[in-house]
Amino acid sequence: MLNNPNYKGIMINKIGKCLSDIQVAEFVDGCLSDNSSIIEHLNTCADCFEQVTDVMNFIEEYADECTELNDSYNNMITEDSDRPQMKGIN
């Protein structure tokens, strides 16, 4: 398709390196103070755009399960911080 001169669809060329899983998560969670470079990349990279939309659709479709997982994770972190810390072996 990319080498076909008769192809009339939208051509999307990748610019730069694709997003990491962490960058996708931070973008979807709204954790980034400046997401302009991410948005610029998503506008040029179909693979990353699809990955972000898949994550967003998954969260929307499984909202209850995602909330339950987040709550479970937060409880685990809280419980771990209440435990006495083991000292390293010298």
Image: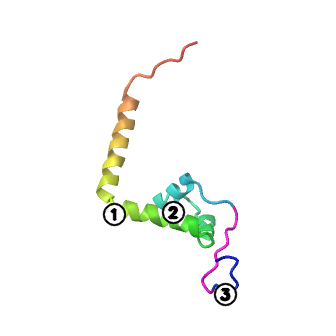
Q: Is residue 63 above or below residue 10?
A: above
Residue depicted at 70% across the width and 63% down the height = 16
State the quadrant of the C terminus. top right
Mark sitting earlier along the chain (2/3): 3
User: Main structural element of the magenta stretch: helix, strand or loop?
Assistant: loop
* Residue 62: percent from left, percent from top: 33, 59
Magenta residues span 8-16
Which residue lies at the image location 51% right of the left edge and 63% below the top edge? 51
For label 3, the residue is 6
Q: Earlier in the sequence, mark 1 or mark 3?
A: 3
Residue at numbered disc 2: 51
Q: Helix, strand or loop at disc 3?
A: loop
Query: Which label number is shown at residue 32?
Result: none
Label 3 crowd (10 A; few <14 / some 14-19 / many >=20)? few
Q: Is residue 70 above or below residue 75?
A: below
Cα–Cα gap, marks 1 and 2: 15 Å
Query: For the residue labelled by badge 1, is the local secondary structure a helix, a strand or a loop?
Result: helix
Query: Which of the two marks, 2 or 3, is nearer to us in this view?
Result: 3
Q: Where is residue 33, by image quadrant?
A: bottom right
Tell me, for residue 61, which label it has, or none.
1
Amino acid type assigned to the residue bearing label 2 in the image: Gln
Amino acid type at circle 1 is Glu
> Does 3 lie within the magenta span?
no
> Along the polypeptide, which appears first: circle 1 or circle 2?
2
- Point 53% across, 17% down: residue: 88
Q: Position of residue 64 (x, y in %)?
A: 29, 56
Task: Identify which amino acid the numbered label 3 is placed on.
Answer: Asn
Q: Given contact means CB atoms under 8 Å apart, are the residues at marks 1 and 2 in contact?
A: no
39 with respect to 79 (left or right): right
